[in-house]
Amino acid sequence: MKKIAFIVQRYGVEVNGGAEYHCRMLAEKLSSSFDVSVLTSCAKDYVTWANEFTPGTSVVNGIEVVRFPVEHPLNLDRLKLADRKLRIRKPKPHQKLLKFLGQLENFEKLTGVKSRVENEMAWIKEQGPYLPQLISFLKANEHNYDAFIFFTYLYYPTVVGISVAPQKSILIPTAHDETPIYFELYKEFFRKPKAILYNTESEKRFVNTLFANSDIYSDVVGIGIDIPVLTPNSNADELLKQAGDYIIYIGRIEVAKACDELVQNFINYKTVTNNNIKLVFVGRAFMPLTQHPSIIYAGFVDEDVKFNLLKHARALVIPSLFESLSLVTLESMACGITVIANQKCEVIKEHIDKSGAGFLYTDTESFKGTIEKVFSADTDIDALSAKAKAYVAENYTWKKVLNKFDAAINYVTDHFSSSTS
């Protein structure tokens, strides 16, 4: 049985994050065909990267997990300083000319000026989680693994770890259009892995266009969607009685996910309507919560409560501008629940355009219009529900996902074996 290791910034049933949850589901599913391990941090919270888990080896849902301590927690002052150095270090005209002539690196060595890549790497380390012990482990034990699967392009374990054994490496970038992806260091990084597995076609187009790396083995894989059989839950029942007719947001409640704009759009909608529609938030809050009689904050709940609330909602709303897959969107569609999303989010727009099972908005007025549509008697909710379920059933089954992973892992291991024989 081939031995593979997932490298991811956080891991565990208590970890609240789309990419981390995605990684855990894949690790557990692939364990029936491969000897799977996970190499990760001791952090539970990405806001601080504080070491909350015990270092060393443990077992999570049957998967061996090896944890390494974060060298230092997130320090916002140091991160801001690193960010400031990046902004200051914009190329001057003579540096652009030297770069064009291929002499910029020699100039920087002679003058002692830190290169932009060095400043970018300093930013990556300060952003966290800084895990040099994990990298040392990879270097010492690389020969014990047949393949490495790195999750998310953004963090130190992936940025540095993928150079240890690029010929054995599979990257799941979870990339989207954000400032760090334009770092100089990623021009080389995105050409290193032996294979890249994307979540969506739009992510693949974006990365291929930005880095001209379409010659690398790749596939659009995503994840399989499982919807649990619901059981009676008193916590969910109490929330359902309180909510009445509602739309729902599920995920981290933070400004980075445009939750502040969602709150304001919903309050604006309520000021001009006379109805009982409510907005329910499910997830941990990382921003101040605006109190309003029609907004309910359920907090972080277990999966049974989450799916009970999701299945009884009229629509899921996703205000985020940047997503690489959006598991909750696919879960919602699998449940037959309509999705309302920000049109600027290319990934979810693609889900909605392909499925025909949702509505897009661009501003406060169109947001109001989407809510009116999903609650309108003229809207065929049953037809939307059928389209949503069909889209997920056709594109996001575990059988298809695991077959694609088998193919990618076999490609990597077969090519590595032939190159070393």
Image: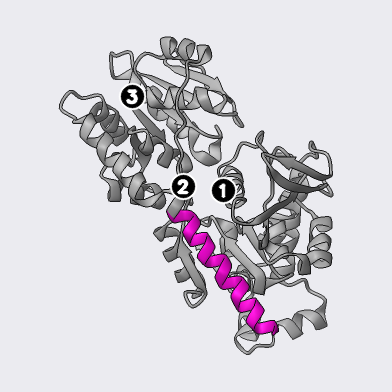
Disc 2 secondary structure class: loop
Q: Residues within 10 Å of mark 2 (few under 14, many from 20)?
A: many
Using the image, determine if residue 326 lies above or below residue 3. Answer: above
Q: Position of residue 167 (x, y in %)?
A: 65, 74
Using the image, determine if residue 364 lies above or below residue 59. Answer: above
Q: Quadrant of residue 116?
A: bottom right
User: What residue is shown at x 45% (from left), y 30% (from top)?
Assistant: 249
Contact check, label 2 and label 1, Cβ < 8 Å: yes
Q: Which residue lies under the disc numbered 1?
A: 29
Q: Which residue lies under the disc numbered 2?
A: 224
Marks counted in the figure total 3
User: What residue is shown at x 78% (from left), y 39% (from top)?
Assistant: 50
- C-alpha distance separating marks 1 and 3: 43 Å
Quarter placement of the C terminus: bottom right
Nearer the observer, 417 or 265: 417
Tag 3 or tag 1, which sits nearer the N-term?
1
Left/right of residue 152 with respect to residue 45 in the rendered view: left
What segment is highlighted magenta in the picture? 400-421
Q: Which residue lies under the disc numbered 3?
A: 269
Nearer the observer, 232 or 2: 2
Tag 1 or tag 2, which sits nearer the N-term?
1
* 414 inside magenta stretch: yes
Given the image, on which type of amino acid does mark 3 rest? Tyr
Please, what is the dominant secondary structure of the magenta stretch? Answer: helix
Q: Residues within 10 Å of mark 3 (few under 14, many from 20)?
A: some
* 124 inside magenta stretch: no
Given the image, on which type of amino acid does mark 1 rest? Lys
